[in-house]
Image (cartoon, rainbow, N blue to C red):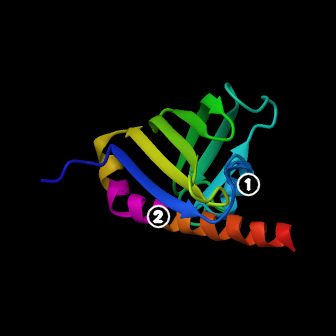
Amino acid sequence: MARPLKEFALAIDIDAPITKVWAEMVDWEGQSEWMLSTRVYDDRRSPDGVGHTLRAFTGPFARWNRVLGVMDEMVVSAWEPPRFCRVEHVGRIIRGYGTFTLTPDSRDPSRTRFDWFEEIEAPSWILAAMKPGILIGVWISLQRFKRRVERREVRDVE
């Protein structure tokens, strides 16, 4: 019997400099545009950086629905622009942490590697339900993020 997913990591190379990738990555509400089936709510009251709070609702039709899915409450616990951000999942259902690590390409500073890591602590039935789609969903989300950043990079150059 397969164990429920607890940790996962994915990485993607993006044709944009690290500062552009960082700016898009920490546009919390903008994540709603590229994170699959997720709507992000930024509290906008806390300053950027450590202690900033946000919520993300993930479920079918998350843009219009807040019934079928899970609300993920998060607090930024590490903030090292433009290279690293860690968020703690502090909700009643989803707990754990996630990290975003950006690394400029040593041979080409106009390219950036984006590493996404999550460790989720949740009831095993939730993890088992999430497992089939979570890696695919994150992979699709990262592909959407890559296209978004690269399109903006082209517009910035024009």
Between residues 24 and 82, which one lies in front from this camera angle? 82
Q: How busy is the neighbourhood of tag 2: few (under 14 within 10 Å), some, or many (20 plus)? A: some
Give the residue furthest to the left. 1
Could you say which disc has been placed on residue 20 in the image? 1
Magenta stretch contains residue 16 = no
The amino acid type found where label 2 is placed reads: Trp
For marks 1 and 2 on the same chain, the one whose residue lies earlier in the sequence: 1
119 to the left or right of 76: left
The quarter of the image holding the C terminus is bottom right
Instruction: Look at label 1 and name its amino acid.
Output: Lys
Q: Residue drawn at (81%, 31%), measured in percent from left and top?
A: 45
- Looking at the picture, how far across and down is residue 33, in whole percent? 69, 63
Residue 137 in sight in this render: yes
Which one is closest to the eye, mark 1 or mark 2?
Answer: 1
Identify which residue is drawn at 54% across, 43% down: 101
Task: Give residue 135's position: percent from left, percent from top.
Answer: 40, 60
Residue at 40% across, 50% down: 9
Range of residues picked out in magenta = 129-138
- Say which of 125 and 73 sits in front: 73
- In the rendered view, does 81 fall on the left or right side of 116? right
Q: How far apart are marks 1 and 2 (CA)?
A: 20 Å
